[in-house]
Amino acid sequence: EVQLQASGGGLVQTGGSLRLSCAVSGFIFEEYTIGWFRQVPGKNREGVSCISGSDGSTYYKDSAKGRFTISTDNAKKTVYLQMNNLKPEDTGIYYCAAGWDTMVEIWTPREYHYWGQGTLVTVSS
């Protein structure tokens, strides 16, 4: 059974940091890209960052560049999203998701086959 378990969200002040974790199981990690998406009420789910399980390539949306770092612990099958210098606009439910490593549209949610349950990040001003 494929499972993605996201955790690490919470309430933090502007400028603070959080580290999100996504524990994955039930599939071959190296065959997938793992992505982090954020969703706020009334808006579409948007990509934040993703990492290739095959070669470790990392990708960031402009809003995350320079502040967020995605990494993996392949032995633990866990993907991390270190978020620094958080801003109120980073607030939302963060989901981790897995899609085939060969996909092209890495920021398109429908390209991802498996989703975790989400973890809430709230950044206060």
Image (cartoon, rainbow, N blue to C red):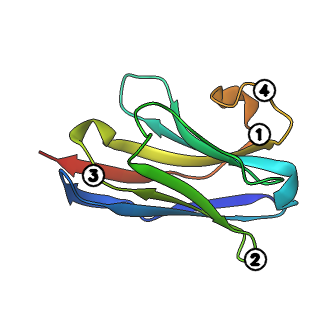
Name which of mark 1 and mark 4 comes first in the sequence: 4
Position of the N terminus by quadrant: bottom right
Residue 36, percent from left and from top: 56, 45
Which residue in the protein does label 1 denote? 113
In the displayed image of the protein, which residue is found farthest to the front?
Answer: 66
Which residue in the protein does label 2 denote? 75
Q: Nearer the viewer, mark 2 or mark 3?
A: 3
Q: Which mark is residue 85?
A: 3
- Direction from residue 96 to residue 120 in the image, left or right: left
Which residue in the protein does label 4 denote? 104
Task: For residue 35, say whether it is visible.
Answer: no
Name which of mark 4 and mark 2 comes first in the sequence: 2
Name which of mark 2 and mark 1 comes first in the sequence: 2
- At numbered mark 4, what does the secondary structure look like: helix, strand or loop? loop
Query: 10 Å neighbourhood of mark 2: few (<14), some, or many (≥20)?
Result: few
Query: 10 Å neighbourhood of mark 4: few (<14), some, or many (≥20)?
Result: few
Query: 10 Å neighbourhood of mark 3: few (<14), some, or many (≥20)?
Result: some
Q: Which mark is residue 47?
A: none
